Image (cartoon, helix red, strand yellow):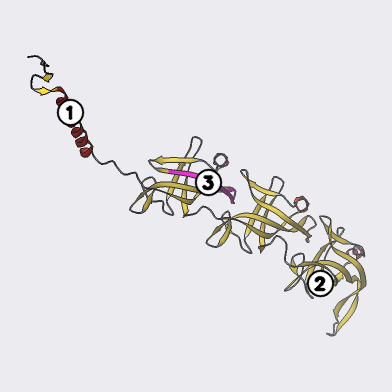
Amino acid sequence: MELLDDEGQLFGVVNVVDALVVLFVLAVVAAGAAFVLQPNPEPEPELATTDATLDLGTQPGYIIEEIEAGDTYSPSGEAGLEITDVHLAPQGDSTRVILAITLNGSVSEDTMNYAGAPPRVGRSLDIQTSTYQVSGTLRDLGSGPKTTTTEVVVEDTVSTETATTIETGDTYTLGDKEIATVESVHAYGTDNPDRKRVLVGLSLATLRDDGNARFGNTTVRVGATIPFQTSAYSLNGSVQRVGATEPQGDTATRTMTLQLQDVPPAKADSVHTGLTETVRGTTIADITAVDREDATVILTSRDGNIYERDHPVNQDLTLTADLTVRETATGVTFKGRTIQQGSNVTLDLGTTTVRATVVST
């Protein structure tokens, strides 16, 4: 049998045009069925992002040198971590590292998941890059470290050389970050001419935690010990004031009367008008007058009578001195200490050091 007869019918039965129409309809039906019967596509996973604080604890210098803002880590799937800031702080002889990070993860039943579990405070997280691997603890969610600058005045007793070395603008640097800066320096003599007491104003890079400013592992408050270190010197100062870099009060000069009693001849002869206490180029005490009289001695006779007599060699000295003080709302301070009638003050006068009693202010 011929495929097409003389009338153009397929196998002598079906017109060729009708056959093509039927085939087209069957193809459309088959395609529609395939579309309807194919499985529904999986919905795109819902993703979420949150900021967090990751505490790495103390880390060695060679690790700290590698950690940088912008470092990323993806442990699995949609989970991802990016470091947005690096905070360094002293902790003893080590350096503590606290990171601001951004976490990316999937959402399941309204809960964000990061690498298989919700990112909860206290959870340990790893970071691995091509150059380092560290592990830390989540200490806050929803925000990174709350960094701030806290001003303090600290007090320390240091060598005379160190007291002259400290300069405004000196910085304490960890890694490549400046974590503290000297804003002011005041130095005073002590009983030991080789030692000076310094009041140093510092601005500290601190973290705000539960309402408290923390410098490393130390809560910044009066009485706390704050370290400061440069290549030339180090301090471990006790905080005297928080919220300012200068000691309290306004600077003033007051003329005061001081007294030294029962002074041996050699010591008495070393005290004279014109002596000053000058540290770092600043004069804080100037002796303008010295009055002398014989010291007295109390004697008891054999019969029990008590007599007051002049001492054969010792003297009582009355000094008039111009002292640089600070006047505060609660009184007057000298060398950072409250001074009033009856107070004892130590003056390092260069050639001699005296400890005198304040007679009048």
Q: Quadrant of residue 43?
A: top left
- Residue 343, labelled with which disc? none
- Of circles 3 and 1, which is in front? 1
Q: Residue at x 74, y 59 (%)?
A: 197
Q: Which residues are magenta?
A: 80-94
- Of circles 2 and 3, which is in front? 3
Does residue 133 lie above or below 4 as drawn? below
Badge 1 crowding class, 10 Å Cα cut-off, few under 14, some 14 to 19, many 20 or more, is few
Q: Residue at x 43, y 53 (%)?
A: 122
In terms of sequence position, does the residue under pointer 2 or pointer 3 come before the other?
A: 3
In this figure, what is the number of numbered marks? 3
Residue type beneath disc 3: Thr
Q: Quadrant of residue 217?
A: bottom right
Q: Label 3: which residue?
A: 84
Task: Report the quarter where the C terminus lies.
Answer: bottom right
Q: Nearer the viewer, residue 220 or 272?
A: 220
Badge 2 crowding class, 10 Å Cα cut-off, few under 14, some 14 to 19, many 20 or more, is many
Secondary structure mostly taken by the magenta-highlighted segment of the chain: strand
Q: Label 1: which residue?
A: 21
Image-based side of 351 in relation to 338, left or right: right
In terms of sequence position, does the residue under pointer 3 or pointer 1 come before the other?
A: 1
CA gap, disc 3 and disc 1: 65 Å
Image-based side of 9 in relation to 308, left or right: left
Does residue 79 lie above or below 206 as drawn? above
